[in-house]
Image (cartoon, rainbow, N blue to C red):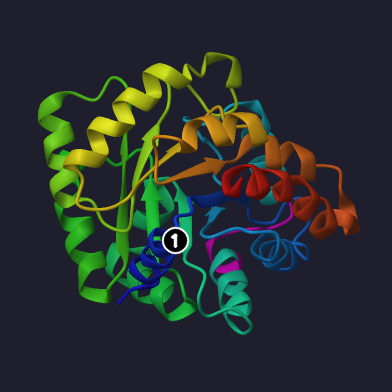
C-alpha cells in the first residue's frame, strides 16, 4: 500500500478527517522547513503539502506569492525542496508528502527524471495547478512508472465531463478548490455550496476528497470537514509563519493544534 492508502485507511477506521497543512519550502527560512514539517505532524497533520517556490504562482494570492518570493531569494529551488523531503524522511517514513506547485520546474527537470528524483527523496505525490488534465497523459505516465501520484484539482467551475475524467484518473486524493479564485480569499468561502459539491464528488471519486482554499481556522476547517474526507489549510498558516524566525516550529504547532482539536471534536 502507498502512504496515501495507509493513512486514509487509518483515518477511516478511526472515524477521523485528514488535516493537510501547506507550507512554502524555504520560508520563513531554509533551516526551518524540516523542523516545521515535523512540528506539524506532531500537532496532528496527516499529510503535508510542501510548496515548491515559483516566480509566477498564478493560482496563489498575495500571502503565498510573497512567501514564494522570499524562499526563492534564499535559494530554495527544486533541489533544495527534494533535499528537505529526504531529510524529513530520516525521521518520518509514514506521513505522505505532496509537492504543490507549477509545471515549469518539472518540465525543466524533465518529467521522468523529476519523478525518479522525487520518489528517491520520499515524495508521494505532486499537485501541478497549471497542468490541464487533458494534457497530463505524458506527465502521468512518467509519474506512474515511478509510483508518484499526480494529485488532481477540481473546482466549482469544473465541467461535468472534466469531473468524470478527474474522478476516474485521480490518485492519492482529489483536491477540491472550494471557490473560484486564488488562495487566501477566505471571505469567498461558501461552506454550504462547497459541501454539496464535495458530497457529489465523494460519491464518484475513486480516492478521498479533501477541500482547500478559504480554510483559515478551526471553525472553517470543522465546517468543511463535515462533508469532505479532509481539509487543506495554507495561506493562514503561511502568514502565521512569515515572521516567526527561529520560533517557526512552535508557531506552526500552535496554529495547527486547534484545527486538529476541532476536526476530532
User: In this orientation, which residue lies closer to the viewer: 145 or 230?
Assistant: 230
User: In this orientation, which residue lies closer to the viewer: 113 or 50?
Assistant: 50
Q: Residue at x 48, y 38 (%)?
A: 225
Query: Image check: 140 left or right of 121?
Result: left
Q: Residue at x 69, y 66 (%)?
A: 42
Q: Is residue 107 above or below residue 67?
A: below
User: In this orientation, which residue lies closer to the viewer: 97 or 128?
Assistant: 97
Q: Position of residue 55 (x, y in %)?
A: 56, 40
Query: Image check: 40 left or right of 175?
Result: right
**Does the image show residue 86?**
yes
The magenta span reads: 73-80
Q: Residues within 10 Å of mark 1 (few under 14, many from 20)?
A: some
Is residue 75 part of the magenta span, yes or no?
Answer: yes
Q: Is residue 136 above or below residue 164?
A: below
Q: Is residue 165 above or below residue 94?
A: above
Q: Position of residue 2 (x, y in %)?
A: 33, 73
Q: Helix, strand, or loop for circle 1?
A: helix
* Residue at the spot of label 1: 11
Is residue 165 part of the magenta span, yes or no?
Answer: no
Furthest toward the bottom, the residue is: 90
Query: Image check: 190 left or right of 26?
Result: left
Q: Residue at x 54, y 45 (%)?
A: 54
Furthest toward the right, the residue is: 246
Looking at the rendering, which quadrant does residue 76 occupy? bottom right
Amino acid at each position: 500500500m502507498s502512504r496515501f492508502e495507509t493513512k486514509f485507511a487509518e483515518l477511516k477506521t478511526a472515524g477521523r478527517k485528514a488535516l493537510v497543512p501547506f507550507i512554502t519550502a524555504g520560508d520563513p527560512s531554509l533551516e526551518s522547513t524540516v523542523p516545521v514539517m515535523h512540528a506539524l505532524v506532531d500537532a496532528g497533520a496527516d499529510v503535508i503539502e510542501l510548496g515548491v517556490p515559483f516566480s509566477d504562482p498564478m493560482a496563489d494570492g498575495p500571502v503565498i506569492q510573497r512567501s514564494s518570493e522570499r524562499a526563492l531569494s534564499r535559494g530554495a529551488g527544486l533541489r533544495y525542496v527534494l533535499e528537505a523531503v529526504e531529510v524529513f524522511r530520516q525521521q518520518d517514513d509514514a506521513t505522505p508528502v505532496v509537492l504543490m506547485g507549477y509545471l515549469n520546474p518539472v518540465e525543466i527537470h524533465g518529467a521522468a527524471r523529476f519523478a525518479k528524483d522525487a520518489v528517491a527523496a520520499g515524495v508521494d505525490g505532486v499537485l501541478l495547478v497549471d497542468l490541464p488534465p487533458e494534457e497530463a497523459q505524458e506527465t502521468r505516465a512518467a509519474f506512474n512508472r515511478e509510483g508518484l501520484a499526480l494529485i488532481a484539482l477540481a473546482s466549482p467551475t469544473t465541467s461535468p465531463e472534466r469531473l468524470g475524467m478527474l474522478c476516474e484518473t485521480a490518485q492519492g486524493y482529489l483536491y477540491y478548490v472550494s471557490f473560484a479564485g486564488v488562495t487566501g480569499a477566505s471571505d469567498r468561502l461558501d461552506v454550504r455550496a462547497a459541501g454539496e459539491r464535495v458530497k457529489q464528488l465523494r460519491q464518484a471519486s475513486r480516492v478521498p476528497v479533501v477541500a482547500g482554499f478559504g480554510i483559515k481556522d478551526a471553525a472553517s476547517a470543522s465546517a468543511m470537514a463535515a462533508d469532505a474526507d479532509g481539509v487543506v489549510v495554507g495561506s493562514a498558516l503561511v502568514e502565521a509563519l512569515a515572521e516567526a524566525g527561529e520560533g517557526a516550529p512552535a508557531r506552526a504547532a500552535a496554529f495547527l493544534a486547534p484545527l486538529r482539536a476541532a476536526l476530532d471534536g
